[in-house]
Image: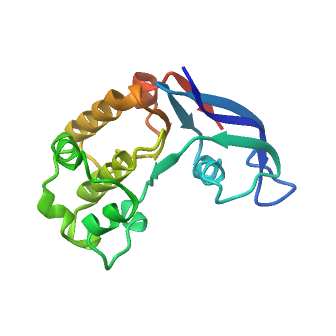
Amino acid sequence: MSTLLEVKNLSFGYKKDFLLFDDLSFSLKKGEIKVIVGASGAGKSTLFELILGNLKPLNGSIERRRASEVFQDPYSSFHPSYSLINQIKDVASVDNLKAYLSKLNLDYELLLKLPHELSGGQLQRASILRAMLMKSEILLLDEPTSALDNVIQLEVMKMLLDSLDEKGMLLITHDLELAKWCGDEIIEI
């Protein structure tokens, strides 16, 4: 299995005298799902920002292949005045669109709408759709199913797990049962 992400001796804090994490190291290989857990404010989402290169670590290094993220708040991850399909086409190929729409229980007509015209659950699934269509090797999933009911949550998680033969995933969740069910390793920060 090839390594997709290597985090070595990572240290970061917004204040130098208060580090969110110090000397954090882990790797992610193709076919793995690792789960990040921790209290609110522990730095879970900040870790994703570091992995994506939006923040610079104080110490350590991050080497990664192409990554895409599903944000916890789907309303903040889409521009409010453009249709979803146009925002998806801006960053991804729509070659497998029909297959993913079916797996995510979404109608194409929903993608023609603006973000505020969808429910939180529909928009969250559209965010997952966009991330899957980006064909990245790493999926960074920040509470990706928290806005979904239990049945849809299970279907979406199964679809994500089915794609592990071509990807690796980091999942942030507060749901320890979900973490134990799907994670190869749980990383507490």
Locate residue 153 relative to residue 68 in the image: left or right: left
Q: Quadrant of residue 107?
A: bottom left
| Rendered view: 154 above or below 45 | above
Q: In which quadrant is the C terminus drawn?
A: top right
| Rendered view: 12 above or below 173 | below
| Rendered view: 115 above or below 186 | below
Residue 151 appears at what percent x and percent y?
20, 37
Residue 74 appears at what percent x and percent y?
37, 60
Q: In which quadrant is the N terminus drawn?
A: top right
Locate residue 143 relative to residue 5 in the image: left or right: left
Q: Quadrant of residue 188?
A: top right
Can residue 172 be spotted in the picture? Answer: no
- For the view shown, which residue lies furthest in the bottom direction? 81
**What residue sits 77% from the left and 54% below the top?**
13
**What residue sits 77% from the left and 52% below the top?**
57
Locate residue 93 relative to residue 73 in the image: left or right: left
Residue 39 appears at what percent x and percent y?
59, 44
- For the view shown, which residue lies furthest in the right direction? 17
Given residues 17 and 5, the one toward you in this image is: 5
